[in-house]
């Protein structure tokens, strides 16, 4: 074995320098990440598409559509519910595109939390976005970026990323509001249960052709919902 | 200066090759699961793997970080086949970078993503072992001709 003390010393010095450099880089990365606002780094898909599709439609809290629309369609949903996400993607868009945009119908989303405890902060976050006129943008984007039920994906980071993508302007206010709106989520959940709803999404409709709020359950198609709306008109 | 308390370089090389091969397997599985539009399945249950895979931290410049992991493990495997200072220092540098990045990713999982992916933890453990093996190899054998050549001479 022919050790070369100088060469060896130089190699070890280089290694020590590299180790120090890597340690410094890792520390800087951690510090930068820990001070970057605690969220908003999750990728949110379909933001442009969703925001464009809702552009120009009035939103008042969680009500989408002209406040004077004669018919109100009430949807009780859970943001973690994949079936609700399916309705948001497939069943409701034609109704939003036609009847809601024409001012014939308004849709009121109300939370009915059935999946897990995480549905409560998720629902409150939507309501808080609704306080800034972006409730439906939040709702639609949450559904389109939904993770698996009860998988723990409903983190502050995820919800903040959805809020940003939904166009919520005042995130500090949104953060404050969402903490105060969990009671509202529990209230509408109790309301739905009193109506006899125990699955999501559940719908009800009210209009000139109904005697108060008429329960629809879970209509299986756009056509069935359109028919109920026509009956209520 | 080699001391007798170090395992032989040949032993370290074999250990590095073995652990790097395991790392290639883990990183390849994560990359394949991601390329199919899904996410790695957590063997011990839970959904941490899906949550981590869905986070923006799982990709750098559009490339899944598991791909970088594969490259790192392949380089480490290659370094195990040579017993010279370039391989010792190169192996140490790659393992050091991989270890540092693993520490950062583990921090992200715990404090930012708030989910643990068992496959990512497995890779972090393997990279930590590789870092220790390569550091031992460098400290014990830098500037020497120990290792394969010495073994060949002994044979």
Image (cartoon, coloured by chain):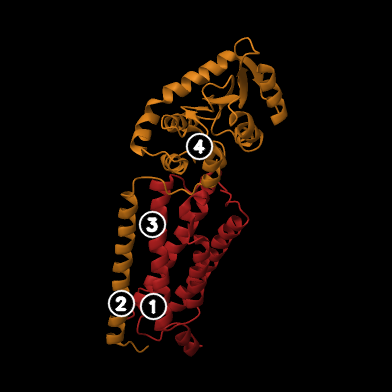
Chain colours: A orange, B red
Work out whether disc 2 and disc 1 sit on a shared chain.
no
Q: What residue would you read off at disc 3?
A: B104
Residue B41 vs A4, above or below: the answer is: above
- Depth check: A23 or A85 in front? A85
Q: Residue A55: percent from the left, percent from the top? A: 52, 38
Sequence-wise, the earlier of marks 2 and 4 is 2
Instruction: Mark 2 and mark 4 in contact? Answer it, CB < 8 Å.
Output: no
Residue at x 51%, y 41% (from the top left corner): A51
Work out whether disc 2 and disc 4 sit on a shared chain.
yes
Residue at x 32%, y 71% (from the top left corner): A18
Residue at x 38%, y 46% (from the top left corner): B111
Residue lying at the far top of the rendered structure: A211
Chain ID at mark 3:
B
Q: Secondary structure at mark 1?
A: helix
Residue at x 41%, y 46% (from the top left corner): A40
Q: Secondary structure at mark 3?
A: helix
User: Mark 3 or mark 2, which is nearer to you?
Assistant: 3
> Mark 4 to mark 1: distance in Å?
53 Å
Q: Which mark is residue B89?
A: 1
Instruction: Mark 3 and mark 1 in contact? Answer it, CB < 8 Å.
Output: no
Q: Which mark is residue B27?
A: none
> Mark 3 to mark 1: distance in Å?
22 Å
Q: Which mark is residue A137?
A: 4
Chain ID at mark 4:
A
């Amino acid at each position: 074995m022919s050790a070369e003390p100088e060469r060896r010393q130089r190699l070890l010095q280089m290694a020590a320098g590299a180790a120090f450099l890597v340690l410094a880089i890792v520390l800087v990365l951690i510090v930068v990440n820990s001070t970057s606002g605690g969220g908003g780094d999750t990728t949110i898909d379909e933001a442009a598409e969703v925001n464009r599709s809702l552009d120009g439609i009035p939103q008042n809290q969680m009500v989408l559509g002209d406040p004077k629309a004669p018919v109100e369609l009430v949807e009780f949903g859970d943001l973690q519910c994949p079936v609700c996400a399916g309705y948001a993607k497939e069943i409701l868009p034609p109704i939003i595109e036609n009847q809601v945009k024409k001012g014939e119908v308004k849709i009121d989303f109300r939370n009915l939390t059935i999946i897990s405890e995480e549905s409560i902060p998720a629902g409150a976050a939507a309501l808080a976005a609704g306080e800034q006129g972006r409730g439906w943008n939040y709702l639609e984007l949450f559904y389109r970026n939904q993770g698996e039920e009860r998988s723990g994906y409903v983190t502050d980071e995820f919800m903040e990323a959805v809020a940003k993508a939904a166009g919520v302007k005042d995130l500090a206010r949104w953060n404050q509001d969402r903490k105060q709106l969990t009671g509202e989520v529990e209230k509408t959940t109790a309301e739905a249960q009193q109506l006899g709803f125990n699955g999501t999404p559940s719908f009800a409709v009210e209009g000139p052709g109904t005697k108060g709020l008429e329960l629809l359950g879970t209509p299986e198609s756009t056509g069935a919902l359109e028919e109920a709306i026509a009956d209520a008109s | 200066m080699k001391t007798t308390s170090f395992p032989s370089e040949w032993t370290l090389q074999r250990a590095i090759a073995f652990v790097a091969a395991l790392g290639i397997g883990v990183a390849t599985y994560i990359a394949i699961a991601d390329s199919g539009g899904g996410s790695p399945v957590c063997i011990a249950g839970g959904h941490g793997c899906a949550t981590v895979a869905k986070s923006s931290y799982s990709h750098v410049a559009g490339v899944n970080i598991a791909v970088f992991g594969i490259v790192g493990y392949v380089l480490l495997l290659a370094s195990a086949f040579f017993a010279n200072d370039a391989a010792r220092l190169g192996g140490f540098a790659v393992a050091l970078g991989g270890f540092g990045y693993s520490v950062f990713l583990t921090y992200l999982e715990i404090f930012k993503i708030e989910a643990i992916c068992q496959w990512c933890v497995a890779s972090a453990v393997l990279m930590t072992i590789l870092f220790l093996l390569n550091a031992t190899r460098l400290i014990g054998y830098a500037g020497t001709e120990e290792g394969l050549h010495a073994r060949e001479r002994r044979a």
